[in-house]
Amino acid sequence: MSTILSPSSTLDTDTLIQLSGTGKRYGNTEIIRDIDLYVRRGELVTVLGPSGCGKSTIFNLIAGLIQPDAGQVQVQSQIGYMQQKDLLLPWKTVIDNIALPLRLSGVSKKDSRQRAAEYIDLMGLRGYESQYPYRLSGGMKQRASFLRTFLTSQDMMLLDEPFGALDSITRSKLQRWLLEMKDNLNLSILLITHDIDEALLLSDRLYVMSSRPGRIVEELGLPMLREDKAQRLVSGELLEIKEHILSLL
Ligand code: ADP
Ligand code: MG
């Protein structure tokens, strides 16, 4: 059992995360069983499953917040973890919210604000740096949280239902925005969702989970329209895959 890659590990350099036969229980309840999952550099991988099937538990294992009872969790990258309810602190300005994890890790106020400021335009937050979070729309709050997470990793991001609380129009804008950010910032992303359309739009690869205990019932590669994912939602091929996934859930 380990959460950090040991020198003797067999992970190749492009495998950033690997779970092998991983299990976790709380008391007598088995939460997840025998999870095999990996993320390679540059991939956007999705974990799709019903509420309560153990998705956030998998992320907590990867982030090292909890330990597995069975199998292995190997991580070979600095991880940025945007948790399911990643709230901005209402009493801090937008820029100080974004810079907070850097401050906590010992970076000076000036340097951490500067690092955050470099990405303000890209995140569409120009002009809001000194505002308090209540002035931001739902989408802007999520972009601010995303930047806060990005600054702690710059490489591999775990996103736990990042668009779950948004209205469908904002959500669909942010899904496209995320694909742009992935390319612009050269990210590898592991994303949790319970929304099939979101998973089909965003994923290079997709794990489908079932519950009680949470298990992976299928792994699907989605190589089609990889360069123009926005076209996917009107693709007949993807509709067939959607029906297949629905039959699994
Ligand atoms: P998901 O993210 O897929 O909705 P979670 O991983 O949050 O699911 O939770 C899976 C199951 O584990 C749920 O039934 C939840 O109640 C249970 N669970 C999560 N964390 C704990 C904990 N700390 N103690 C006991 N049960 C927990
Ligand atoms: Mg969850």
Image (cartoon, rainbow, N blue to C red):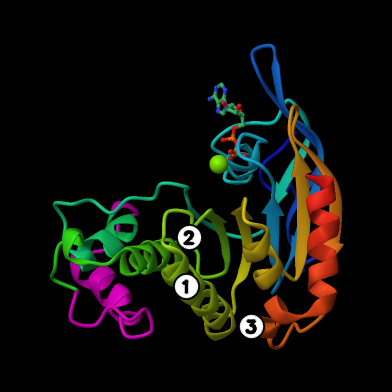
Q: CA distance from mark 3 to mark 2?
A: 17 Å
Which is nearer the eye, 115 or 5? Answer: 115
At numbered mark 3, what does the secondary structure look like: helix, strand or loop? helix
Mark 2: few/some/many CA within 10 Å (<14, 14-19, 20+): many
Q: Is residue 178 above or below residue 133?
A: below
The amino acid type of the residue labelled 2 equals Phe
| Nearer to the camera, 242 or 147 | 242
Residue for point 47% across, 48% down: 83
Residue 181 relative to residue 9: left or right: left
* Horizontal and vertical percent position of residue 179: 58, 78
Number of numbered callouts drawn: 3
- Three-letter code, disc 1: Leu
Residue 192 highlighted magenta (yes or no): no
Residue 138: give its label: none
Is 19 displayed left or right of 119 in the figure?
right
Q: Residue at x 69, y 76 (%)?
A: 233
Label 2–label 1 contact, CB within 8 A:
yes
Disc on res. 230: 3
**Rendering coords of residue 13 (x, y %):** 77, 67
In percent of width and height, residue 220 lies at 85, 61
Q: Quadrant of the C terminus?
A: top right
* Mark 3 / mark 1, whichever is N-terminal: 1
Q: Main secondary structure of the magenta part?
A: loop
Residue located beneath label 2 in the image: 163
Pointers 3 and 1 in contact (CB under 8 A)?
A: no
Residue designated by label 1 = 174
- Check the picture and name the quadrant holding the N terminus: top right
Horizontal side of 70 relative to 171 (left or right) equals right
Q: Which residues are magenta?
A: 104-128
Can the viewer see residue 19 in this picture?
yes
Classify mark 3: residues with Cα within 10 Å, few (<14), some (14-19) or many (20+): some
